[in-house]
Image (spheres, coloured by chain):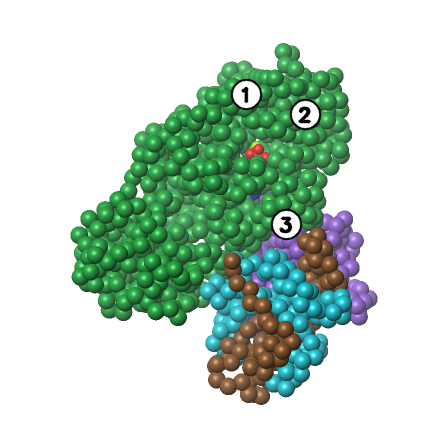
Chain colours: A brown, B cyan, C purple, D green
Amino acid sequence: MARVVVDVMLKPEILDPQGQAVQRALPRLGYQGISDVRQGKRFELEVEGPVDGTVLARIREMAETFLANTVIENFTVRVEDAAEATAEAASEPKAEGVAP
Amino acid sequence: MARVVVDVMLKPEILDPQGQAVQRALPRLGYQGISDVRQGKRFELEVEGPVDGTVLARIREMAETFLANTVIENFTVRVEDAAEATAEAASEPKAEGVAP
Amino acid sequence: MTTRIGVVTFPGSLDDRDAQRAVRLAGGEAVPLWHRDTNLHQVDAVILPGGFSYGDYLRCGAIARFSPVMETVIEQAKAGMPVLGICNGFQVLCESHLLPGALTRNDHLHFICRDQKLRVENAATAWTSDYTEGQEITVPLKNGEGGYVADERTLDELEAEGRVVFRYLDLNPNGSRRDIAGVTNAAGNVVGLMPHPEHAVEALTGPTTDGLGFFTSVLKKLVTA
Amino acid sequence: MSPRTPLDTVKHAAATPDARQPFRELGMTEDEYLRVRDILGRRPTGSELAMYSVMWSEHCSYKSSKVHLKQFSEKAPASDALLVGIGEQAGVVDVGQGYAVTFKVESHNHPSYVEPYQGAATGIGGIVRDIIAMGARPVAVMDPLRFGAADHPDTARVVHGVVAGIGGYGNCLGLPNIGGEVVFDPCYQGNPLVNALCVGVMRHEDIHLAKASGTGNKVILYGARTGGDGIGGASILASETFDADKPSKRPAVQVGDPFQEKLLIECTLEAFAEKLVVGIQDLGAAGLSCATSELASNGTGGMRVDLSTVPLRDHTLSPEEILMSESQERMCAVVAPENVDRFLAICEKWDVTATVIGEVTDGERLEIYWHGELIVDVPPRTVAHDGPVYHRPMARPGWLDALQADTPDALPRPANGDELREQVLSLVSSPNQADKSWITSQYDRYVLGNTVLAQPEDSGMLRIDEETGLGVALATDGNGRYAKLDPYAGAQLALAEAYRNVAATGARPLAVTDCLNFPSPEDPAGMWQFAEACRGLADACQALGTPVTGGNVSLYNQTGDTGIHPTPVVGVLGVIDDVARRTPMAFSGEGQMIYLLGDTREEFGGSAWTDVVHGHLGGLPPAVDLDRERLLAEILVNASRDGMIDAAHDLSDGGLIQALVESCLKGGRGARLVVPDGLSAFTFLFSESAGRAIVAVPRSEEVRFTGMCDARGMPATRIGVIDGDTIDVQGAFSLPLAELREAHTRTLPALFGHTRHA
Ligand SMILES: Nc1ncnc2c1ncn2[C@@H]1O[C@H](COP(=O)(O)OP(=O)(O)O)[C@@H](O)[C@H]1O
Ligand SMILES: [Mg+2]
């Protein structure tokens, strides 16, 4: 079972009121130095069987016609796999949020 | 300027009606073989200046207290940088959605 | 024979009964259509009502757009059948690309319910012929994702072709570009708007009866057609 | 995955009588546990213990409140209107023309503090399912709310979440929100109150009760899949050992899915319409434990359930957890075997998962199996109805005498017109008296197309029959400050106000629902407050002829030693033969006469004036005169029916000036007022004497109207005229409407951020 992640973000030229609201709140909460915030969606798809080129192409099509509205949104599709995890670990360990 | 990405997902045990609605729609749209869909939020933060351990710690704190609702959500924080992009490229090229 | 106007019910449609009532009050016959229907039961026009089809999960109208009934509606709309999308119905029409643009989260991030003043900018569509251009009407508005957006070129085109049908007056309730409350396709048979004319058809339950004109407009058009 | 104890079957329980069981961790006392052992003649299995512990909790069993709630039945006034009384999921009232209406208010207080959005959302979801389960179509919701101090840093979090949650769920369900309350007070800081009311309509013949009868009938669970929501307690049972220090983590928070609930409404009503349902029960608190034991104990015969057939969202759940799960948007129906296919087809039509999980037996036991093994074997009544009953000690609080002695008499009053004017502005802009549209504009009030009146009117009014114009009106009220000063009178004043609100719109009050929000019953003072409030409400319902049809008790609203003000919230339902005759609150008829109905006395204890101007709470609340309330209601209803008045607004917190400002702002007209003889301007404007209303009388109706008031012994004082665009109190001050509007509307947006409701 593999996980494919589709990230969907509003196009840069489209106003993102949610991201803006977050950004505006940050200084009030004591966080400085964040010049922009954009808020989008992240889909985690659990795929049965191996994720080969065909499957990925299908998922890309699905993202283009369904998961994203390309009038206003861009998307990226990627397999979440070991390679990525390692890359992340190298740059900075992942912080897992856990409820108190 | 660096970009930090905060992904916020509902905890696995919490009902995700959005993800479920997407998953249920997929077979109708002709997509088989996706056994589960979870939908979460993706925040892209543009950080002024270098992203060092202190900055990242601050962002993690921000994610924990503000961006995520840790009663029901988990989050991850990571720097989106060259290393990651390469790893992704290695595993599978990014599909950029573009408006028709 | 009375004119038959179909009102589609998707799972999660909420204002379908209200749209049916409005059709009846205007003198038409309201025909309930089910999202799984593949034929339109000989209706002469279709209304996609307000609500939260499929919970409005993913994006408003995104899942409804792929329902069986929409295949036929899209086909018929392209062939000239009058189609009105109200609120969620407008979102479905945009998702279906029958109308340009998209509806995004209200800029203030809250759901909002208010009596909204509008200006009728185009009184030549299938659904607005009983109004006059420039007429001001007040009907309820209620949505969380009603901000109309499209790229500048599309917006300019809409303006140039007179396809902006309604504009918000006094106050823009959701950050819509150029105060746009409703638009039409090039042929003028497909109209979508965020405010709810079907909630302004009786003095007792609505702020005005300004909404009736939508339904009388299309009935007249269909009778003379 | 952590290793589990072997399945605790009935056989295993019988063989291991001495196994230690975590009853205390599950909130049971030793006595209660021993009673369970006594009932079963052995130790309970883990699953049985789960069921008893949750069903015998305060929340489900009403063990501390039962002895007091009894009065609502014992003192119930004779009423032809009551079709189904207390004890069912919701009471049912006859409103004429073959229609019946069911309504109920419930609390979701604690969850709304922990997770405001989901807590409030699932509060709406829960009460709506109660109404569907009676066979009715839900037609509207209301939301009485109490928050901490308006300017406390945590209040915004709760307000934003709760309001968005109520809107998010109710709007998506397609139920108009037609009223409610918003009160800020520091006493609710750690214990906000989120009460939710739902009203539904049906034909008399469609009333359904929760019971499972008829051997061989099938038990169908339908709606959402079962997950690990809200079962903190059960995970103790599911963990490795009973005293394991690491019980598996399960969320105490439930997430709502209003879309699923909308499907549940439509599919349930379709099944009712085809007469496929023998009995039905919503799954709320205590989930399947509650539904199966209540269905079985209300019916004849027993029930057998195969728990392993329950569709799960999380396959690691143990049977105990499945029994206790509070996953939302689920219902349980009892259906005759020949109708099962049709029932399942309707569920399929609406994309609702439905599963036969058991059947009604000719025995007397509730038997639950897990993969072929018997894990529960109990007499269902002992779970559902024969829980413990406590006569908890009560004592009039020692501080009450001092509080009542601290009357407002000594508080400085405004010395001149300018000070009066300033205090009026302070009053109408104070968070509790300010315009609430920042909140109510986030709710859909139009959907379904039958809303005749909604906020800010005195009551919400719905048309029920489009042909005849038959309608109902609802209002909820509760004043915790009054109840703190005197819980007996406070409860009566809550009822009186809601009753008056309903009558002010022209509807005849018929029946009552209540949500009793109180601090800990284990504190004798809290228990006394609760008992007094019940006694007061029962007595007043008797006097007014409006029976309590159902409601909800929420105890333990307390942080440490400090409890909330006792807060009985009372909802009144009224009927109006023709909604076209409704009376709105707006003063819009230029030149119409303004009459004050009722007597105005020096009554300031617990008033908004003492709070806003002096931060004071002490003395006694206004006197209760239920005969007067009844007369006032009759006058208001007759005047509406006979077209003698054009507008009416009841007087409550804030007194006459508050009501007048609201009516004038709504109508966009000012007023000239004259202070009646024998009253100071201050008392005239700010007193909170009960049993009063202001009305706008067209000149042509004046003689007829005053004639009626005289004949019936109702004091009616002409106090002014609707005129211009200022409110002018002769000899005291003058305030432009624009200034008043600005003061009245700016407060909530300033506190909680701007939306665009204006
Ligand atoms: N939380 C709420 N939800 C819906 N309506 C509300 C809410 N709070 C207040 N309202 C409405 O605002 C109006 C004014 O409320 P309130 O001052 O409490 O009325 P009253 O004093 O007549 O009981 C009423 O119509 C009431 O129903
Ligand atoms: Mg009132």
Does the closest atom of ligand 1 sit within 8 Å of the Cβ of label 3? no
Does the closest atom of ligand 2 sit within 8 Å of the Cβ of label 2? no
Q: Nearer the viewer, mark 3 or mark 2?
A: 3
Which dot marks residue D550? Answer: none
Q: Which residue is mark 3?
A: C113
Q: Are marks 3 and 1 in contact (CB under 8 Å)?
A: no
Q: Is residue C73 above or below residue D55?
A: below
Question: From mark 3 to mark 2, how far is it between C-alphas?
Answer: 31 Å
The type of residue carrying mark 3 is: Cys
Q: Nearer the viewer, mark 3 or mark 1?
A: 1
The residue depicted at 64 percent of the width and 60 percent of the height is: B62
Q: Which residue is mark 2?
A: D592
Residue D349 percent across, percent down from the top left? 43, 66
Q: Nearer the viewer, mark 2 or mark 1?
A: 1
**Mark 3 crowdedness (10 Å alpha carbons): few <14, some 14-19, many ≥20:** many
**Mark 2 secondary-structure assignment:** loop
Chain letter of disc 3 in the image:
C
Does the closest atom of ligand 1 sit within 8 Å of the Cβ of label 1? no
Q: Is residue D138 above or below residue C189?
A: above
Q: Which residue is mark 1?
A: D406
